[in-house]
Amino acid sequence: MEKPPLSFFAMSFILIFALISFIFIVFGLRRIAFVLGLAMLLLLSTFLSFGMLAVYNSKKWGWTLVGAALMALMLNVFLAYALTSDFGTEHLTALLFSATGAILCLFNLRVSFKKSHEAGMKEKEYYPFIDKMEPEEKSE
């Protein structure tokens, strides 16, 4: 098994800070908002764990899952702000690290798309004379 890329470790660092700040946001909520926020926290942490496991195993869909979960986390931060009308340091930290993580996900998806596109170009070179075949004559 090959070593995980540097972006895996950077994303792990980003996710630690994003999830810890989201935990502070959730525990600042009251009543039913707390229950819904806690459910979203558990759901997002599960998706992020599966996504990072897929990234560790070099699966391209792992970056997509992590990026989607980070977008959902940003949406939940804005929702918590709308419910409490309080925008503190934990909100700013969660948004900053979630946006940074989403940009890193997009960058890794772009790199993997370029690699797969280059691999597709090499497959075309495997049959170099396929375009130079003479057309068959039709008999009437």
Image (cartoon, grey):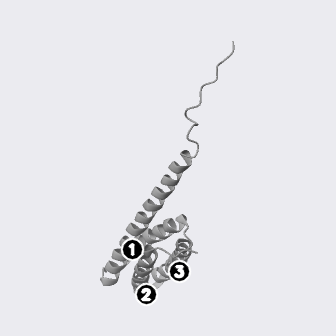
Instruction: Judge by depth and name the residue closer to the eye, 72 or 108.
Output: 108
Q: Which mark is residue 3?
A: none
Horizontal and vertical percent for residue 66? 48, 70
User: Residues under labels 2 and 1: Cα distance?
Assistant: 19 Å
- Amino acid on which the number 1 mark rests in the picture: Ser
Look at mark 2 in the image and give the residue it sits on. Answer: 27
Q: Is residue 48 above or below residue 135?
A: below
The image quadrant where one finds the C terminus is top right
First-in-chain label (1 vs 3) = 3
Residue 29 at x, y percent in the picture = 41, 84
Cα gap from disc 1 to disc 3, whole angstroms: 16 Å
Q: Which mark is residue 98?
A: 1
> Mark 1 or mark 3: which is in front?
1
Nearer the N terminus, badge 2 or badge 1? 2
- Residue with the mark numbered 3: 42
Q: Residues within 10 Å of mark 1 (few under 14, many from 20)?
A: many
Q: Residue at x 66, y 18 (%)?
A: 138
Left or right of residue 96, residue 120 in this image: right
CA separation in Å, label 3 and label 2: 13 Å
Type of the residue with mark 2 = Phe
In which quadrant will I find the N terminus?
bottom right
Is the residue marked by circle 3 packed among few (<14), some (14-19), or many (20+) residues within 10 Å? few
Residue 91 drawn at (x, y percent): 34, 79
**Visible residue check, residue 70:** yes
Asked whether the residues under the numbered discs 3 and 2 touch, taking CB atoms below 8 Å apart as contact, a structural biologist would say no
> Residue at position x 52%, y 50% from top?
122
How packed is label 2: few (under 14 Cα within 10 Å), some, or many (20 or more)? few
Which image quarter: residue 85?
bottom left
Q: Nearer the viewer, residue 21 or 38?
A: 21
Above or below for 5 versus 25: above
Q: Nearer the viewer, residue 132 or 95?
A: 132
Dividing the picture into quadrants, the one containing residue 16 is bottom left
